[in-house]
């Protein structure tokens, strides 16, 4: 229950001291100049305590964002595969929001800081891309989710009320038949014996660069014609079917593999680290006269070839290792002929005799 005591100071000023006591909770006290304000606070505080809101708000006022960021970096980031990268993003938020109490990190403040991030110049002189801003917000959001669910420091996640910038449509750059032949010829002629098999493997499987370069021989099952990825970007195990030239190249490579490492593509100086193919790949692109093309576009090329060869979006998603179809919808227009064929076959079977 709440009790209010009227007090008069030596100079004649009047104040009202409020104390709210509820069984099982620590007493809450406050002082006001007006009786009306004292009564309002007493009613609001008592209701908040009964509903379980008051002490959460108190925690949010007691802890700063810097404290949250440091605890999150200590407890959560080490468990994340890309924790080092997310740690740099979290450090930026800490530099901007660190001194604020968690109760003061409002959606309005986050939106203001988001806009500052978006206008931050990159080494190329451009603003931060919408995709990067979304990733920064994702780290901040998970930080507040942990603070809410596990630490009990906040009552809700303010990031959920902040609008994310709209990301541009996914890039679709794939090799034409002529470009593919020129690139493979340039890779075959490269001084690097690893470039050609690595590029063929990427084109054949649609695997990411890190997945290809990190492959180890225990992951390769030539008898079953598969490569098993135990650690992927989405955290799930994935099997890459091996076929055609990629399978033939791995069979040949297995005959002359190095014995001091189990990496498929070991480095020259350090056999325990994958070889760096950046310079050989860029030189091959230059010699093949191919512009506006990156290694990751080999993955887009594999997906595009699958779509043009009649694979469904679900099949493409499974090959690429995407959990949803959202990431592969960019290839939908390439499989229009396949979709038309599905509709045509359905009409021929079920409707051909009924539409007279």
Image: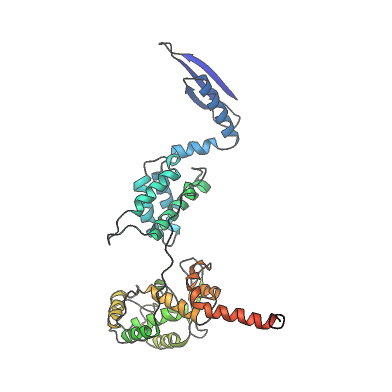
Percent from the top left, x then y, of residue 170? 43, 67
> Would you identify the image quadrant in which residue 44 lies?
top right
Percent from the top left, x then y, of residue 230? 48, 71
Q: Residue at x 49, y 74 (%)?
A: 333
Percent from the top left, x then y, of residue 38? 52, 23
Q: Is residue 195 left or right of residue 157?
A: left
Q: Is residue 93 left or right of residue 144?
A: left
> Would you identify the image quadrant in which residue 22 lies?
top right
On screen, residue 23 above or below 296: above
Q: Is residue 282 in sight in this rendering?
A: yes
The residue nearer to you, when weighing 10 against 68, is 10
Quarter of the rendering occupied by the C terminus: bottom right
> Would you identify the image quadrant in which residue 271 lies?
bottom left
On screen, residue 271 above or below 79: below
Q: Is residue 257 in sight in this rendering?
A: no
On screen, residue 35 above or below 128: above
Percent from the top left, x then y, of residue 118? 36, 54
């Amino acid at each position: 229950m709440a009790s209010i005591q009227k007090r008069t100071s030596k100079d004649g000023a009047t104040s009202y001291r409020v104390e709210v006591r509820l069984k099982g909770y620590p007493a809450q006290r406050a002082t006001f100049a007006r009786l009306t304000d004292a009564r309002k606070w007493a009613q609001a505080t008592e209701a908040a305590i009964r509903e379980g809101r008051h002490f959460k708000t108190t925690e949010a006022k007691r802890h700063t964002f810097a404290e949250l960021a440091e605890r999150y970096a200590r407890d959560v980031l080490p468990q994340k595969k890309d924790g080092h990268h997310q740690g740099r993003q979290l450090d930026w938020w800490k530099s901007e929001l660190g001194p604020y109490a968690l109760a003061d990190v409002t959606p309005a403040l986050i939106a203001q800081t988001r806009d500052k991030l978006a206008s931050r110049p990159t080494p190329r002189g451009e603003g931060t891309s919408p995709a990067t801003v979304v990733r920064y917000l994702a780290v901040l959001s998970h930080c507040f989710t942990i603070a809410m669910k596990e630490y009990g420091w906040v009552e809700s996640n303010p990031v959920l009320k902040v609008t994310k910038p709209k990301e541009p449509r996914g890039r679709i750059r794939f090799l034409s038949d002529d470009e593919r032949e020129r690139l493979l010829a340039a890779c075959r002629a490269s001084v690097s014996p690893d470039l050609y098999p690595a590029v063929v493997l990427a084109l054949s499987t649609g695997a990411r660069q890190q997945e290809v370069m990190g492959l180890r021989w225990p992951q390769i099952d030539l008898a079953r014609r598969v490569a098993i990825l135990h650690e992927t970007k989405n955290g799930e195990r994935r099997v890459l079917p091996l076929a055609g030239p990629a399978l033939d190249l791995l069979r040949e490579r297995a005959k002359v593999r190095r014995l001091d490492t189990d990496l498929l593509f070991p480095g020259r100086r350090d056999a325990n680290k994958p070889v760096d193919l950046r310079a050989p790949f860029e030189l091959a692109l230059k010699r093949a006269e191919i512009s506006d093309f990156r290694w990751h576009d080999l993955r887009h090329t594999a997906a595009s070839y699958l779509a043009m060869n009649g694979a469904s979006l679900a099949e493409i998603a499974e090959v690429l290792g995407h959990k949803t179809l959202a990431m592969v919808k960019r290839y939908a227009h390439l499989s229009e002929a396949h979709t038309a064929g599905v509709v045509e076959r359905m009409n021929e079977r079920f409707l051909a005799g009924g539409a007279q």
